[in-house]
Amino acid sequence: LTGLSITLGYHRLFSHHSFQAAWPVRLMTLIFGAAAFENSALTWCADHRQHHKHTDHEEDPYNISKGFFHAHMGWIMFKLGEPPSFACVPDLERDPLVRWQHKYYVVIGLLAGFVLPAVIGWFWGGADVALGAFLIAGVARTVFVHHSTFFINSLCHTLGKQPYSDRCTARDHWLMAFFTFGEGYHNFHHAFQHDYRNGVKAWQFDPTKWSIWLLSKVGMASHLRRVPDERIRHAEITEQQRQLAAKMAAMPSANVAKVRVQVEAVQYEFRGFPGCYGKGAVGRGQAYSRGTGQYQVA
């Protein structure tokens, strides 16, 4: 519940407004999000919006260019004592539930994250089970959720694929999706941050997406935001074109013909998308110039 409350609540609902939710859903994600001990929703979202606005630059709270450790958890350790800036979350400051959680964040987190598991364990099997529940469902769970979130900021800006955009270091890493309720498809998220999905393909593991969809079917969520399929495919083809062009520019002349077949296949696929022959697109009558590394009118 705590990990899902971070991905569904803190991230996709409050940070990006990728859908709207009924107050019981908002309340539950705020309570169990506090139990993850990743700060209040107000502070978490303020940092996250800064990250998207200034990705890989100095103002990015978890800037990967400062090193893997900094992006993973060093940014938390070294900003202790600095007052958080809420300039980018005025909408959340007006939300009474978010303000309530921010004010009582520590108490809510302790009760939901440590006391509740211990109490359930006590009623289930006495003091021994209560201690085990405290250590496993409380302490160990908190550590696991922390590092799962941290790896999105570090590993998913270091390793993985960039099928949609190379404008920042964000990458898709399928393995991290299994530990983070679908957050591992990070390149897609940075390319289309307001989409309620991270794993946009039908086969991609994204329990957060499925949970939001199920909530919409029972009337607890609405206004699910999704990017049109044509726009997503256009981004994929544009990135394929860029990667192939870079590959051709670096290859010996004898091997260029092999890659050019791939480029021509990408060109052909573009023809199915009207209006895709704008700036940066490969259009009809264009040819690749190895000397300039650009596509030129043939």
Image (spheres, rainbow, N blue to C red):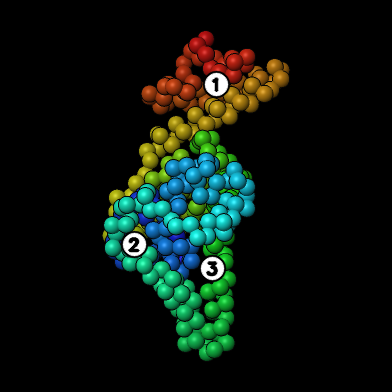
Q: Nearer the viewer, mark 2 or mark 3?
A: 2
How many residues crowd around disc 1 within 10 Å: few (fewer than 14), some, or many (20 or more)? some
Q: Amino acid at mark 2?
A: Val
Using the numbered discs, state the Cα–Cα distance from disc 3 to disc 1 in whole angstroms: 50 Å
Q: Which residue shows up at 49% across the image and 87% down it? A: 122
Q: Secondary structure at mark 1?
A: helix
Using the numbered discs, state the Cα–Cα distance from disc 2 to disc 3 in whole angstroms: 21 Å
Q: Secondary structure at mark 2?
A: helix
Q: Which residue is mark 3?
A: 142
Q: Amino acid at mark 3?
A: Thr
Q: Amino acid at mark 1?
A: Glu
Using the numbered discs, state the Cα–Cα distance from disc 1 to disc 2 in whole angstroms: 52 Å
Is residue 45 visible to us here?
A: yes
Q: Position of residue 98 (x, y in %)?
A: 34, 62
Q: Which residue is mark 2?
A: 98
The relative height of residue 200 versus residue 207 in the rendered view (above or below) is above
How many residues crowd around disc 2 within 10 Å: few (fewer than 14), some, or many (20 or more)? many
Q: Secondary structure at mark 3?
A: helix
Question: Farthest residue in the top direction?
Answer: 298
Q: Which residue is mark 1?
A: 264
